[in-house]
Image (cartoon, rainbow, N blue to C red):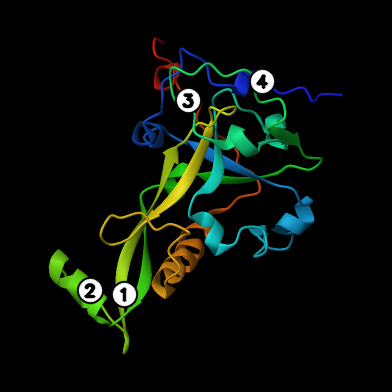
Amino acid sequence: MRLKYPCCLIPKSYYKDCMDMNKIAALKRPCVVRSSSKPFNETFNIETDTLREDIIFPKEIMGLSLNLIGGKLHLRHLKYRAKGSAMKEWRKPEKTTIKKYQNSFEKTKIAVPIYFYLKDINNKPFPYYRTKDSEAQKLIKALNINPPATDDKFIFEGQCFVKHTPNKINYWHVEMFLDDINKAEITPKNKSVWARSAATEAYKHIVSGNARSVVEKYSIIPKAEYLEVA
């Protein structure tokens, strides 16, 4: 028996390639959501209503998968997860169909929402540390900056931002990315100590404290932001 997939999530030919997240961020309460496959009491600390440390790990936030709500995506859709070829980014003029990706999604039994207000995680700075080596010295000279320092490390400032990355069967998919002091993306492929430091600090300063188990209100996304002709 084949699973029934919510067709309202599939990118349409009259949708824009990508939404301008700066315009989305300018709305009153734009919100994104991630789902946990663990029960509520294993996702959040009940006493403090904070995210448990084993739900999102620092290394995951470089490309953290999220969903923009306020458009066609609703909480009941969080149980559907793209996999395989369906996870590739969608671009016009492709016309996707669920028949083509019938084997490229799964439905989970549990999907506990983890909310973030976009203003709390988009275009947000975070500190990270680099050893006082020659490469760090070259970077400082090239950027003509004078960063604060500890006894053996420089303290640089990175930035966390959210980008609209619609995939083959979910137009409302967005991801979190990290930039270093040089405005270059920090990716999981970077195995250096300072990159791990950046991920850890971004998690601590931006992700951990801003995760919510519930939101009272969030903005509805105007059609003009995602339709070619609204």
Quadrant (top left, top right, bottom left, bottom right) of the C terminus: top left
Q: Given the current orientation, which residue lies at the most extreme right position? A: 1
C-beta proximity under 8 Å, tags 4 and 2: no
Picture residue at 73% right of the left edge, 42% below the top: 111
According to the picture, the residue beneath numbered tag 1 turns out to be 155
Q: Amino acid at mark 4?
A: Ile
According to the picture, the residue beneath numbered tag 4 turns out to be 98
Q: Is residue 76 left or right of residue 114?
A: right
Q: Amino acid at mark 2?
A: Pro
Estimate the x, y position of residue 66 in percent, counting from the top left: 56, 42
Q: Depth-wise, is mark 3 or mark 2 nearer the camera?
A: 2
Residue at mark 3 to residue at mark 1: CA–CA distance: 37 Å
According to the picture, the residue beneath numbered tag 2 turns out to be 147
Estimate the x, y position of residue 31 in percent, counting from the top left: 52, 38
Mark 1 residue element: strand
According to the picture, the residue beneath numbered tag 3 turns out to be 221
The answer to which of marks 4 and 3 sits earlier in the sequence is: 4
Residue at mark 4 to residue at mark 1: CA–CA distance: 48 Å
Viewer-proximal residue, 209 or 17? 17
The answer to which of marks 4 and 1 sits earlier in the sequence is: 4
Residue at mark 4 to residue at mark 3: CA–CA distance: 24 Å
